[in-house]
Image (spheres, rainbow, N blue to C red):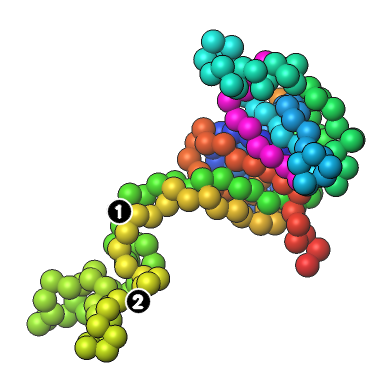
Amino acid sequence: MNAIIGEKLGMTQIFDEDNRAVPVTAVKAGPVVVTQIKRQETDGYTAIQIAFKEMAADKAGRPATGHFAKAGVTPHRHLVEVRVDDPDAFELGQRITIADVLTAGQKADITGISKGKGFAGVMKRHNFKGQGASHGAHKVHRAPGAIGACATPARVFKGKRLPGRMGGEQVTMMNIEVVQVDPERNLVLLRGAVPGPKGSIVVLREAVKANG
């Protein structure tokens, strides 16, 4: 198994063997249960669906209730599909913990939804330098400046870096070091920051580029 779902708890710091402070993000990862198995002959690809965070049965809709009942598990809030090479190695209702996925010292890829920043200007959104603020400059210090040509082509090209909605997008941070794993409390400490606010859902996977 190479992936698990978790909930971001927040950031703190620990001290290593040399008494150096190490910033870490605490994530409550798992346990998750297998709720669906997809095979090449029936679905065209091989994958499993895992579920995280149980919820009250009366809060699940009828389609979701039937889906979980087919797998023989209680309703859960979050579902993620994970590609696997051998779906026959898993069974419905199987319980997967963080110890089955990651160990201390490994590298992991973390996927989450970044914090929403709302409508942002070009300096915050695209790291523009801004225009001159010396004597004689109009109030254009944070303006983007010219954004296109004149009569030709008489339009602004798509993809131009302009003000707009910032954040709230799926982000994957690669090769994050796994500092500690606590299987008893389903906790994992990851070096540095991971996407999303406190309480957000993240997906932890074994790093795909750890060796190159």
Quarter of image, res 50 = top right
- Give the labeled residue for mark 2: 157
SS label for mark 2:
loop
Residue drawn at (24%, 69%) of the image: 142
- Give the labeled residue for mark 1: 119
| Closest to the observer, 156 or 54 | 156
Tell whether 85 sits left or right of 27. Answer: right
Q: Is residue 137 visible?
A: yes
Chief secondary structure of the magenta span?
Answer: strand
Q: Is residue 47 visible?
A: no
Amino acid marked by disc 2: Phe
Which span of residues is magenta-colored? Answer: 73-83
Alpha carbon separation for disc pair 2 and 1 = 21 Å
Is 190 within the magenta? no
Amino acid marked by disc 1: Phe
41 vs 121: above or below: above
Q: Quadrant of the C terminus?
A: bottom right
SS label for mark 1:
strand
Instruction: Give how far across and how far down residue 201 sits, in percent.
Output: 57, 36
Is 80 within the magenta? yes
Q: Quadrant of the N terminus?
A: top right
Residue drawn at (44%, 48%) of the image: 168
Instruction: Give how far across and how far down residue 160 sits, in percent.
Output: 36, 73
Instruction: Give how far across and how far down residue 56 sits, in percent.
Output: 57, 12
